Amino acid sequence: MYKYNNNYCIIKYDYSNLKSFTINLDDYKENYNKQAHFLLKIGLVSERFSGVNALKDEHFKSIYKKYVSNFALNYTPKSVIGCALSHIMCCKHIYKNYIKKHKTHDYARNYFLIMEDDAFPLYEKDEFYEKLNKTLQDIEILDSNWEIIQLHSDGIMPTIDTYSTHIGSISAAAYIISKKAIIKTLKSKIYSHIDLIHHNFMNYNKYRAKENLFYTDEKNSLNRIVAYKLSSYSLHFKSKIFEFLNYYTNIIQLRGEKKFLHYFEYKIFKDPFFNKEFNANDIIDYFIGLKILSKLYYYKN
């Protein structure tokens, strides 16, 4: 295992050269306290950053206007906007307090760790430290101009034994971000999910750990809450079918701890006229309903 005085380590054993942040809403401070307990076990202390609660319409404040597109205001679910805006504002906080203020001093850091409050380390202290340093060392050799390294990633097409990413390499639960990427983030506008859209299409030089160093607790996710009982039954039914089929065929490979249930709960779209938000399950149900109605109409005529 790595030791305190190991000169080959990029990250110091006490993490003194890796400033860490946890995005946490004021209404859910208990989530930060819960996570902090597990982080302390591996020697990591994370600064709490107060996120933007779009469910309370905080995203309409004038200070956020430049970051939220008109498309997002009309068609993107509020929790998705709040999540993306929280990550952008965390980057702004880092830039103002740890990059711009100290850019002429040795204190200036080249990269930072950003986590959401539902991310927890998968390994004990020494093993986590070893895997983190190994990941950074390897990626530095591959590409010293990297901008984002995901320490947690989920989605389809998990890839094996590689640091490369693709459009399905989603999750912003825990990632290391460079100064260059932070500055780039401050120039972005929100359209949808920050992990799926911005980190893929804003030309970030993105990599990910070969295997996740964090896992996420999905129970209290604001992006995956089923509002209607009928929708909940439909969601569980479809997820069980997919899990059954995939168990025998393994056609759709998944990375991380998420099940098909979580992906069907994923909020995707907001109807601007009725102000109703739809998750993936809702959209599939409406599509099936329309197909049935069109078939009935065809047979009647």
Image (spheres, helix red, strand yellow):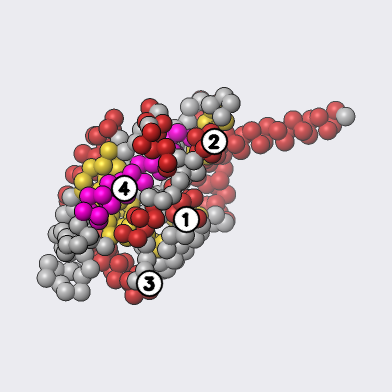
- Comes first in the chain, label 2 or label 4: 2
Q: CA distance from mark 2 to mark 3?
A: 37 Å
Dot 1: within a 10 Å radius of its alpha carbon, few (fewer than 14), some, or many (20 or more) residues?
some
- Residue position for label 4: 92
| Residue 56, above or below 280 | above
Q: What residue is at 45 percent from the left and 62 percent from the top?
A: 165
- Residue position for label 2: 75
Mark 2 vs mark 4: give the one in front.
4
Check contact, mark 3 vs mark 1: CB within 8 A.
Answer: no
- Comes first in the chain, label 2 or label 3: 2
Residue 143, labelled with which disc? 3
Residue 189, labelled with which disc? none
- Report the magenta residues as a range: 75-101
Can you give x and y, in whole percent of width and height, for residue 76 in the image? 51, 37
Q: What residue is at 56 percent from the left and 46 percent from the top?
A: 242
Q: CA distance from mark 3 to mark 1?
A: 18 Å
Q: CA distance from mark 2 to mark 4?
A: 25 Å
Task: Give, as a three-letter code, the residue at label 1.
Answer: Met
Task: Answer whether residue 28 is magenta in the image.
Answer: no
**Residue 159 visible at all:** yes
- Comes first in the chain, label 1 or label 4: 4
- Residue position for label 1: 202
Q: CA distance from mark 4 to mark 3?
A: 25 Å
The quarter of the picture where residue 58 lies is: top left
| Residue 37, above or below 127 | above
